Image: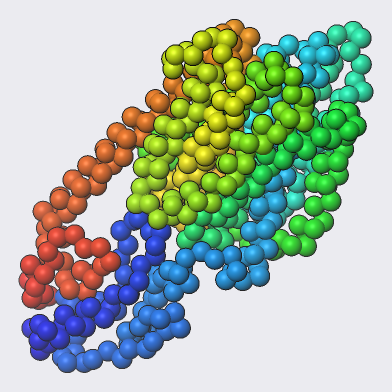
Amino acid sequence: MSDYSDDEETEESASLLPTKERPHSRLTTRATSPFVNYVSVPVTPRQTPTNQVLSNGYEQIGNDDTDTSSIPSTESSAGFSFFALPRKQKAILASVCMADFLSYLCLSLLAPFFPQEAADKGVNDTISGWIFGVFALSQVVFSPLFGKLLPYVGIKFMYLSGLFLSGGCTLLFGAMAFVPVDNGPLTFVVLCFLLRIFLSVGCTALNTSCFTLCAKEFPDYIATVFGIGEVFVGVGFMSGPAIGGVLYGLGGFFTPFLVIGILILLCVPVNYIVLPQDENFQPSESKTSSFVLLKSPSIIIASLGIIVASLIWSILDPTLEPHLREFDLGPELIGVLFLVMSAFYAISSPIWGWVADRCPDNRLLMIPGFLFSAVGMLLLGPSSLLGFDEDYNELWLNIVALIILGISASLALIPTFDIYIEFSEELGFEEDVNTYSLVAGLWGSMYAFGDFIGPSLGGTLLDVVGFQWCCTITAICCLIMIPLLFFNFVYDRCRKRSVKKSVPDSKEEQTKLLGDSLAVETVGDYMASYPPLSATQV
């Protein structure tokens, strides 16, 4: 037996643990111990390790081979601060925010005037809804593909290519004003579908590269950075209908697409200078795919949550403007009403991102998000389930409902990307660009699927059952998500507790030694096997 006394060993053992934890970490992590297994390598009696104070505030025990890469830094423990970031990360974050803004600006640009313009050309509400929805349907297909392709082509190349394609397609969409419809609207409809598909390809490449860049550069604050990005998503949604309505009123159908398309194209050379050069990525040799991620029930339910949260937004694109026609507001004021929901989404997004980084389980945040989203949809109808008459429609009630939807949709959506990252790590995926791009592709695909269902389903429901029941059905979808998330959370908690209880019963864990028992989170009484067994006993 070593000549150490119990008091001395306890004091030394305590010095091995870092004094701070990563605030975002929810997984059980083990601190690297400089003590190796006593069974295989004897320890010299009463040899006191030499401690060295590192620059990050932790002590390194006197072992040159100690791996300190897993020890958290004081910077990550202090909290996220934009002003404390190095210049490179500031430029990256600004670039990501700009991409989020532009991609959703060109997406929402036509919401306040396109349904009426299409109707004037002989296109009904159902086809108009499909023109909105085909953008998202293409994203469903291309998001996983770009997530798999990104490690091969690089983040910067995919980013710039997506930006160029988005600007070009936005510019060309304005030319639809000059397409003749004397022989019917078929040519107009086909060209609208084609341009929306190619615009979707550009925006998908742009968003996938942005999500991957965020996860790679800010791994400790994924939800916070994602929330900041969603501010500019909301600003893009917010300013898109408003800017589109104003420019449409000034110069007609072509003007909004001309101005925004040129603006996006001008950003290509700027971002070529700002973005860092691509690293030499090494694509994973393992056969990982989105289907492997979807083996987790938690990821499946989170995916359903993304679809429904996206549906809350997108179902209003082809339906809100016809619902508001009776107020005789005009495209400018209708754009302002779209602005209301987006403004509150943008304001609340960084708050929910900050909360999500500190919440033990982000599914607990999604539950109230879907509950209040259902309330907002029932008020927007307004639904007969709340006792409103079928012909009841007040402008003030629409505004209140849009405010509730902006805040609650943000709460339901913001935590989902961090949930994807967390459960992909539990499945054994490494924390590298391959995993981040795969997760970004799957997240984008699920969001796009909801974005596709919304306009397609919304246009059909508007024609068949009207706006009131369209909102009621959306509210029911939100309410279904609440028990799914709750029972999934309870199931995971019970499963993890049962695993923890079974650990001390195994022979391997009962013979744990002191060096192996030094962990950030310990399970069971490992000191029950002290003193260590000798080599002959093992």
How is the structure coloured here? rainbow
In which image quadrant can residue 295 be found?
top left
Residue 234 appears in view: yes
Q: Residue at x 64, y 64 (%)?
A: 90
Taking the spot 57% from the left edge, 9% from the top edge, the residue there is: 391
**Total residue callouts:** 0
Q: Measuring 11% from the left and 53% from the top, which residue is drawn there?
A: 505
Say which residue appears at 46% left-offset and 27% top-offset.
374
Where residue 96 appears, x then y in whole percent? 65, 53
Relative to 366, say whether 27 is above or below. below
Toward the viewer: 173 or 230?
Answer: 230
Q: Is residue 500 left or right of residue 84?
A: left
Quarter in which the C terminus is drawn: bottom left
Figure check: 456 above or below 182: below
| 316 w.r.t. 216: above or below | above
Q: In the drawing, does residue 277 fall left or right of residue 293?
A: right
> Residue 508 versus residue 460: which sits nearer the camera?
460
The quadrant of the picture occupied by the N terminus is bottom left
Judging depth in this view, the residue of 340 and 352 nearest the camera is 340
Quadrant of the image occupied by residue 454? top right
Picture coordinates of residue 46, whole percent (x, y): 17, 92
Is residue 143 visible in the rendered image? The answer is no
